Image (tube, rainbow, N blue to C red):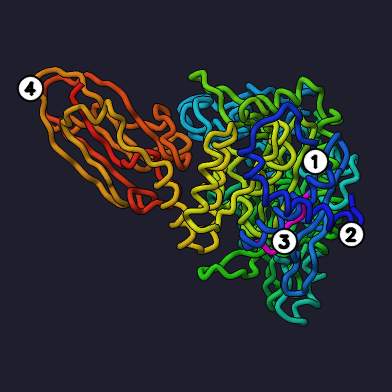
């Protein structure tokens, strides 16, 4: 939706003036009269201003965004340049790579197959030819929910490579590739003309010079001649095309064998075997009297009195030698095609979309914008290209249950539950999160030269969509850990369209670049508000943003400000306890050890703070039996609690009974984010290490 220029300018000015008085409003006496709700135009003006400011701050060349409200596109716009070198502006029609937003489409296709009874969520993935090492049986739901590693279903661990294995589930269950179903079931019906699955760059089989080019037709004719021999059951025709010494690799390699066993093949044809092979994408390169032909082949084999069975598709390469003016087959190699060939419809879509595709960029070592190349893959995990307007069509269709029943869609949006009983941050192809009673359904994309984000807030019937031509929309976030509020653009949208109603008042804007005393005063004014935690998250966002664009001084200043405002002394009950052993204020790349002994069995209190994320600890402590060299207790991420600051700051505070004996207290750190060398906000306690106290 577009607004008249004067109206938009007025809205921006109104928003700017309002921002200067928000802190006065926040501290003024409360009255029974509620402030008038801002109009959508006013909200959008504020959002546009925030998004453009963030784009420049994140050094993103371009992004496009849209807001869907009430199942209608409320607003869509491009920011910056989709092609910096040629000064081509981004618009709402600009296509971008979506990276992992592709997973939401895979969710829809797979849940359709579940709904049709072709796939069961509890099917072992081995049923579909997927072989993965595991401590238990990996099922389809585990790949869809990123819970396939370790003991399947126990913990969430985002893994795009494992998610991509779902290609095989789609192919075997439907008999069609994910790309084919994506186009037929979603893109075509919704008229998503600005969307296409990626097509990798393909290097053709071509002769190095014009002399070879003239002979390519002869080599192609030789391929078709030997294929015709199989289709007609004429073994002599096949043999005429074979060199005296010929061989082949079959399947994925193995030993060399002859191309055919003439006697066996002749007997099979005489018994009634019928073959029907088709050759696709045949190319040839000729180098004097030697040539290579590459092609795809597929077809059917019908035994005598039996039903036709599908054969292929195979990827094939034939090496030829010209002898006495005739091209003869010297060597053949065949391997199964793991991914379906690109269909003509797929290629046509790609060719149309790629013409206006936003160009990819990254920041170099000096944090300057430089043009790069996009990744080449396409799978259930990533590789779809689209526009924000097309994604809006998709979002509306989801809410109108055009693909799935309400029950099936609800299942995809339901968070997975660990085998230990806890709720995990991911459903079936979607992140799902609850912030103080507000449900957030979302996904993000993060790949080379591109990033994206979609955020649905069902209680407000509103969706935010954004796509960028660099990775910095997602790189300085913790979205992969399941926190939508770590997205700077996501936070800007929520503060504009969702949180004012949730908290009953407009949320103030903090000037993060203000001098230290002023910044501290702003944060102190917010401290008692029900939304105060949002500003701690936003502080972390700003810190990570500064780091991602090379603003180390500004990042360090925020860490210092955070520590001065929120760092606390050790809890009084701990400070009073006698210390048995401790390792504290541990910097990066350390492996420290302290010995201690107990003359009798004793209850001890262990307090430790370290770094952990998604089931793993990176900075952590443990206690080991000094005589046996074996651990008796170890800090595990699943048993930790949040320690304040960055979400990866993890804390343990527990009582443990240790028998008499000799012990070693241990603590180990990796190469980043340890005491005094923070790459994110520090914990609330000025402590990094482990201590054992007398209980």
Q: Earlier in the sequence, mark 3 or mark 2?
A: 2
Q: Which residue is mark 4?
A: 599
Do the CB atoms of the residues marked 1 and 3 lie less than 8 Å apart?
Answer: no
- Specify which label sits upstream in the sequence, 1 or 3: 1
Badge 1 vs badge 2, beta-carbon distance below 8 Å: no
Q: Earlier in the sequence, mark 1 or mark 2?
A: 2
Start-end of magenta stretch: 60-65
Q: CA distance from mark 1 to mark 4?
A: 69 Å
Query: In screen coordinates, is 211 left or right of 58?
Result: right
Residue indicated by mark 1: 38
Residue situated in front as seen by the camera: 591 or 241: 591
Which of the two discs, 2 and 4, sits closer to the camera?
A: 2
Q: CA distance from mark 1 to mark 3?
A: 28 Å
Query: Viewed as shown, does residue 569 lie left or right of 439?
Result: left
* First in sequence: mark 2 vs mark 4: 2
Mark 3 highlights which residue?
62
Q: Earlier in the sequence, mark 4 or mark 3?
A: 3
Residue 62 drawn in magenta: yes
Residue 343 visible (yes or no): no
Q: Residues within 10 Å of mark 1 (few under 14, many from 20)?
A: some
User: Closer to the N terminus: mark 1 or mark 4?
Assistant: 1
Location of residue 134 with respect to 671 vertically, above or below: above
Tell me the CA gap for discs 2 and 4.
Answer: 81 Å
Q: Secondary structure at mark 1?
A: loop
């Amino acid at each position: 939706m577009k607004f008249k220029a004067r109206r938009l300018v007025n809205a921006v000015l109104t928003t700017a003036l309002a921002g200067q008085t928000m802190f006065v409003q926040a501290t003024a006496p409360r009255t029974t009269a509620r402030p008038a709700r801002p109009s959508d135009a006013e909200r959008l003006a504020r959002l546009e201003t925030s998004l453009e400011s963030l784009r420049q701050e994140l050094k993103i060349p371009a992004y496009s965004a849209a807001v869907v409200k009430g199942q209608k596109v409320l607003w869509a716009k491009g920011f910056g340049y989709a092609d910096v070198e040629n000064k081509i502006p981004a618009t709402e029609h600009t296509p971008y790579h979506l990276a992992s937003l592709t997973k939401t489409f895979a969710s829809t296709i797979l849940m359709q197959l579940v709904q049709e009874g072709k796939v069961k969520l509890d099917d072992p993935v081995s049923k579909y030819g997927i072989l993965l090492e595991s401590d238990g049986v990996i099922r389809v739901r585990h790949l869809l929910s990123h819970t396939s590693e370790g003991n399947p279903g126990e913990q969430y661990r985002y893994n795009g490579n494992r998610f991509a294995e779902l290609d095989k589930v789609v192919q075997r269950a439907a008999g069609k590739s994910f790309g084919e179903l994506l186009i037929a079931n979603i893109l075509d019906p919704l008229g998503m003309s600005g969307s296409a699955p990626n097509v990798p760059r393909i290097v053709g089989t071509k002769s190095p010079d014009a002399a070879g080019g003239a002979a390519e037709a002869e080599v192609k004719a030789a391929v078709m001649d030997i294929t015709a021999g199989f289709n007609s059951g004429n073994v002599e025709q096949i043999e005429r095309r074979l060199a005296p010494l010929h061989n082949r690799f079959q399947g994925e390699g193995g030993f060399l064998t002859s191309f055919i066993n003439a006697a066996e093949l002749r007997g099979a044809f005489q018994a009634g075997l019928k073959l029907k092979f088709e050759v696709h994408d045949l190319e040839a390169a000729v180098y004097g009297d030697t040539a290579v032909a590459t092609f795809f082949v597929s077809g059917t084999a019908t035994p005598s009195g039996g039903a036709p069975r599908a054969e292929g598709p195979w990827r094939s390469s034939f090496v030829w030698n010209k002898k006495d003016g005739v091209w003869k087959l010297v060597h053949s190699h065949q391997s199964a095609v793991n991914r379906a060939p690109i269909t003509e419809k797929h290629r046509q879509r790609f060719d149309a979309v790629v013409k206006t595709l936003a160009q990819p960029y990254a920041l170099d070592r000096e944090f300057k914008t430089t043009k790069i190349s996009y990744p080449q893959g396409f799978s259930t995990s990533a590789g779809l290209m689209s526009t924000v307007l097309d994604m809006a069509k998709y979002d509306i269709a989801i809410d109108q249950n055009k693909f799935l029943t309400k029950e099936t869609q609800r299942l995809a949006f339901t968070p997975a539950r660990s085998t230990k009983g806890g709720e995990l941050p991911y459903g079936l192809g979607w992140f799902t999160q609850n912030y103080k009673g507000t449900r957030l359904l979302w996904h993000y994309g993060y790949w080379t030269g591109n990033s994206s984000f979609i955020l649905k807030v069902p209680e407000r019937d509103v969706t935010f969509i954004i796509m960028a031509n660099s990775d910095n929309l997602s790189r300085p976030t913790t979205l992969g850990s399941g926190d939508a509020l770590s997205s700077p653009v996501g936070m800007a949208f929520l503060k504009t369209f969702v949180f004012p109603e949730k908290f009953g008042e407009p949320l103030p804007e903090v000037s993060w670049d203000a001098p230290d005393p002023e910044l501290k005063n702003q944060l102190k004014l917010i401290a008692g508000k029900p939304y105060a935690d949002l500003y701690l998250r936003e502080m972390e966002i700003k810190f990570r943003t500064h780091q991602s664009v090379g603003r180390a001084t500004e990042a360090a200043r925020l860490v210092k400000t955070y520590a001065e405002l929120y760092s606390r002394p050790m809890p009084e009950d701990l400070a009073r306890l006698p210390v048995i052993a401790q390792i504290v204020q541990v910097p990066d790349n350390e492996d420290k050890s302290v010995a201690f002994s107990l003359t009798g069995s004793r209850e001890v209190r262990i307090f430790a703070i370290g770094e952990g994320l998604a089931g793993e600890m990176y900075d952590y402590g443990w206690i080991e039996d000094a005589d046996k060299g074996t651990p008796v207790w170890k800090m595990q991420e699943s048993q930790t609690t949040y320690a304040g600051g960055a979400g990866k700051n993890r804390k343990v505070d527990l009582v443990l009974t240790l028998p008499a004996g000799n012990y070693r207290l241990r603590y180990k750190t990796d190469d980043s984010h340890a005491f005094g060398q923070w790459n994110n906000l520090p914990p609330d306690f000025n402590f990094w290490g482990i201590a054992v106290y007398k209980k």
